[in-house]
Image (cartoon, helix red, strand yellow):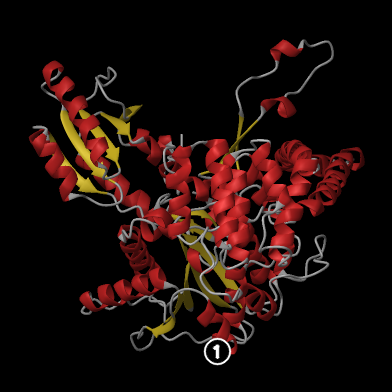
Amino acid sequence: MAAHLSYGKVNLNILREAARKDLREFLDKCAGSKAIVWDEYLTGPFGLIAQYSLLKEHEVEKMFTLKSGKLPNADVKNIIFFVRPRLELMDIIAKNVQSEDRLHSSRDFHILFVPRRSMLCEQRLKDQGVLGSFINMEEYILDLIPYDGDLLSMEYESAFRECYLENDQTSLYHTAKGLMTLQALYGTIPQIYGKGDCARHVANMMLRMKREFAGIQNQILPVFDTLLLLDRNVDLLTPLATQLTYEGLIDEIYGINNGYVKLPPEKFAQMKQGEASKDLPTEPKKLQLNSAEELYAEIRDKNFNAVGAALSKKAKIISAAFEERHNAKTVGEIKQFVSQLPHMQAARSSLANHTSIAELVKDITTSEAFFDSLTVEQEFMTGVDTDKVNTYIEDCIAQKDPLIKILRLVCMQSVCNNGLKQKVLDYYKREILQTYGYEHILTLHNLEKVGLLKPQTSSRNNYPTIRKTLKLWMEDANEQNPNDISYVYSGYAPLSIRLTQVLARPGWRSIEEVLKMLPGPHFEERQQLPSGLHKKRQQGENRTTLVFFLGGVTYAEIAALRFLSQMEDSGMEYIIATTKLINGTTWIKTLMEGISWSPK
């Protein structure tokens, strides 16, 4: 059991168990030995639901990655394809099946579509002449995957691109379905608030689905009091900024995928005296990052400048615990010490790992390049010189710094200035195309279409008004002992989280004017609860809000919401859900043309 999923106010293990049950039932339909052929993108999300041991219990003997050509040899009765409903994957499956049919006529083929079956895909298999080869064709509804005790993600990488660039609302349908699954397990959510066009669509779909199931009343006492749906394009600024929490920086520098990070191995090698350096490992060090690890849960949401002190405090506690062995005199005391030993050794190993990670991150954050870039970001956020060509960006282009870095900064300037003057925008475009190549003209067009990089259409820039009204910039943010969410970006309070904070108290009516300046409608809906299911709140009991980010959320925003949950006077606990965990780089990559942005 994934214990860390059940620590919080909402036991997310119920969701994981429901997903595991469905998986077991499907595997049992395919009687006999099995080999699974994986769409590579699904292996990470599935790893959070079921380990190999569960598959093994249900006679899964081999696992392969989906590749064109012939399948690897496997002496099994069933071959099961776990795939997303993508046409290009159907062509690969058809080749696999055709090559197998000639060799082993007695094998059974099955397909599990994740998260939905697709008529188009079935038609493609029919056109290729292999549809009849499949005994079972089913869908496995994996919409919301529990990542941590307070975090759910759909891992739907292309959601933002589809909604804002391609006008494809498939991801919104999956979101509504995922929320219906959640309500089936945790009770109907009585209040729904939202901001943005996509939020409105999702709420409408949820209400329609509820009407369609009108006869089936959900008799579960509601766990969530409120659902807040937020469009990513309501707050385009936050993902562009460099996150400054420990977890946020790990993601910015190394990338966290499905709860794992791969790090350079040198810092983790235990060098013994006289050992040659050629023996050092060359494989990246892969670590799992979640709240199951006590130390990580403690430091992940801290501003990076507060992490060093937290690690040294922990080191003192651990070494004092090990010193206790000298005081253990009686058999009972020694026995007690020995029983604590595994926990203490795990804590020591965890401390060593995080000290090494912190050193790796510190090498980056203390560099001049990092400081210069951060200074420019903070100038843009505070409204300094956002209306003219920035000399630092010019220098970065001249030095041919990574294109993504340039795009993040230029987009940030555009967002903080409500668009750039035409001649400034044209100058940036020309410089980027001449330095990095004309193939990027499509990328620039995409960024313009989603509103990240645009010409100024009205002379009025609303950003300063929004910044002042919502207190988005706080001078002298306290990084060590924070008293406001702005610590996650050392001064900038994420707009998305300020909206969440104001909704809880004093309510959105107090900021009507600002809400009108932000894109898309804002709304409130109520869902009727069956009689007898209205919560009777205990004295001092916190309300629970599910905040759903449509189009992605950053680790810094998650840290800010956790901070609000922990504030004594907030009276609110937050559970976070999203279409995808993102940072500025992965987000911009999904909007780029001519590069493959699907994860390796």
Q: Is residue 372 above or below residue 277?
A: below
At 52% from the left edge and 41% from the top edge, which residue is drawn? 433
**What is the number of callouts on the image?**
1
Q: Badge 1: few (under 14), some or many (20 or more) residues near its Cα, within 10 Å?
A: few
Q: Is residue 239 left or right of residue 521?
A: right
Q: Position of residue 352 (x, y in %)?
A: 76, 36
Q: Give whichever of 485, 455 is nearer the camera.
A: 455
Indicate the position of residue 160 as horizontal and vertical percent values.
43, 57
Is residue 535 in view? yes
Task: Give the x, y percent position of residue 309.
Answer: 85, 50
Q: Secondary structure at mark 1?
A: helix
Q: Is residue 344 above or below residue 116?
A: above
Callout 1 amino acid: Arg
Give the residue drawn at x 26%, y 21%. 71
State which quadrant residue 361 falls in.
Answer: top right
Q: Quadrant of residue 135?
A: top left
Horizontal and vertical percent position of residue 409: 63, 52
Closest to the observer, 119 or 308 = 119
Q: Is residue 132 above or below residue 213?
A: above
Foreground of the two, 497 or 270: 497
Residue under label 1, please give it. Answer: 509
Instruction: Residue at 52%, 59% (x, y): give it.
Output: 452
Q: Nearer the viewer, residue 463 or 147?
A: 463
Residue shown at 31% from the left, 30% from the top: 66
Q: Is residue 224 visible?
A: no
Residue found at the very far front of the displayed protein:
423
Is 340 on the left or on the right of 558, as rendered? Answer: right
